[in-house]
């Protein structure tokens, strides 16, 4: 078990790092008192009791009342499922209640960090109406396979410009000779995302719906496809 990695993942579910460490301690033992948790983790008893109370409040642990109160962990699957359901409900309420704008932004938006770039691509693909052109390093394509496959199943056009052949039934694939750690995406001839894709937090991309910029970018990708087609005929 990579405890440090698990603690980071549990933190994403609303636990502090100390609470996550104590939760892992509880999962490794059937039931423990606050004193026992303190001995096993090395945390002070006052911090342990505060964390245990918080874990109970957050739905990650149960209190077993008795002559000596003890605690047991809620199964990870149950805890995560409950948290996701709660967040889904909150998400629906936020989307329903938050003020809406009628028009999408057409300005130039900078997106920083590989994770945020991937999140933006997922969102773009989820809203494609007609077609998408996508160029990216092959090693990251699998992250978006489910999104792209869903588009194909719904009759949308998917064009991929890649550095090597991949199995992707239904997609139109062009093989590029030049290798680069970049992503380029055009959705419905209306939105463009382009920039670095190395897997680093330092990656940056430009996202834009400005018509003139989209047209120039679209023409550039079309020209690249024509050159690939001409090379295939020679």
Image (tube, grey):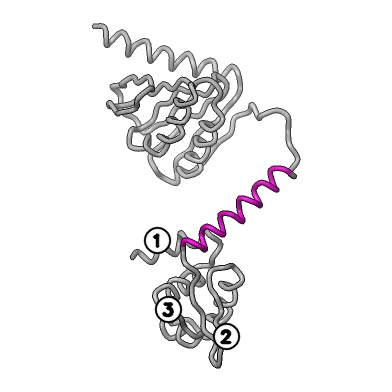
Q: Distance between the Cα atoms at labels 2 and 3?
A: 15 Å
Q: Quadrant of residue 109?
A: top right
Nearest to N terminus: mark 1 or mark 2: 1
Disc 3: which residue: 30
Estimate the x, y position of residue 113 in percent, counting from the top left. 48, 44
The answer to whether 210 appears left or right of 152 in the picture is: right
Q: Secondary structure at mark 3?
A: loop
Instruction: Give the image location of residue 76, x and y in percent.
Output: 46, 64
Q: Secondary structure at mark 1?
A: helix
Q: How many marks?
A: 3
Q: Position of residue 155 (x, y in %)?
A: 48, 21
Tell me if residue 212 comes above or below residue 84 in the rendering.
above
- The dot on residue 5 is 1
Q: Residue furthest left?
A: 234
Disc 2 target residue: 65
Q: Are marks 3 and 1 in contact (CB under 8 Å)?
A: no
Q: Residues within 10 Å of mark 2 (few under 14, many from 20)?
A: few
Magenta span: 77-96
Q: Is residue 40 magenta?
A: no
Residue located at (49% from left, 88% from top): 35
Q: Residues within 10 Å of mark 3 (few under 14, many from 20)?
A: few
Q: Secondary structure at mark 2?
A: loop
Residue 183 lies in what quarter of the image? top left
The mark nearer the N terminus, 3 or 1, is: 1
Q: Is residue 101 above or below residue 6?
A: above
Nearer the observer, disc 3 or disc 1?
3
Does 28 appear above or below 120? below
Q: Position of residue 185 (x, y in %)?
A: 47, 26
The quadrant of the picture occupied by the N terminus is bottom left
């Amino acid at each position: 078990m990579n405890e440090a990695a698990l603690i980071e993942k549990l933190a994403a579910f609303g636990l502090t790092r100390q609470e996550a460490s104590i939760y892992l301690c509880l999962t490794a033992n059937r039931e423990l008192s606050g004193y026992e948790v303190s001995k096993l983790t090395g945390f002070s008893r006052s911090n342990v009791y505060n964390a245990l109370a918080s874990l109970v409040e957050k739905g990650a642990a149960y209190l077993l009342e008795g002559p000596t109160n003890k605690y047991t962990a809620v199964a990870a699957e149950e805890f995560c499922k409950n948290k996701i359901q709660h967040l889904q409900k909150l998400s629906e309420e936020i989307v329903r209640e938050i003020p809406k704008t009628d028009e999408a932004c057409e300005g130039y938006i900078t997106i920083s960090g590989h994770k945020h770039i991937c999140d933006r691509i997922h969102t773009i693909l989820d809203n494609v109406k007609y077609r998408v052109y996508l160029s990216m390093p092959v090693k990251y394509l699998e992250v978006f396979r489910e999104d792209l496959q869903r588009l194909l199943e719904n009759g949308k056009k998917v064009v991929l410009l890649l550095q090597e052949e991949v199995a992707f039934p239904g997609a139109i694939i062009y093989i590029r000779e030049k290798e680069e750690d970049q992503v380029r995406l055009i959705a419905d001839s209306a939105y463009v995302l382009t920039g670095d894709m190395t897997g680093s937090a330092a990656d940056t991309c430009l996202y834009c719906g400005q018509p003139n910029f989209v047209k120039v970018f679209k023409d550039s990708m079309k020209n690249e496809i024509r050159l690939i087609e001409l090379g295939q005929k020679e």
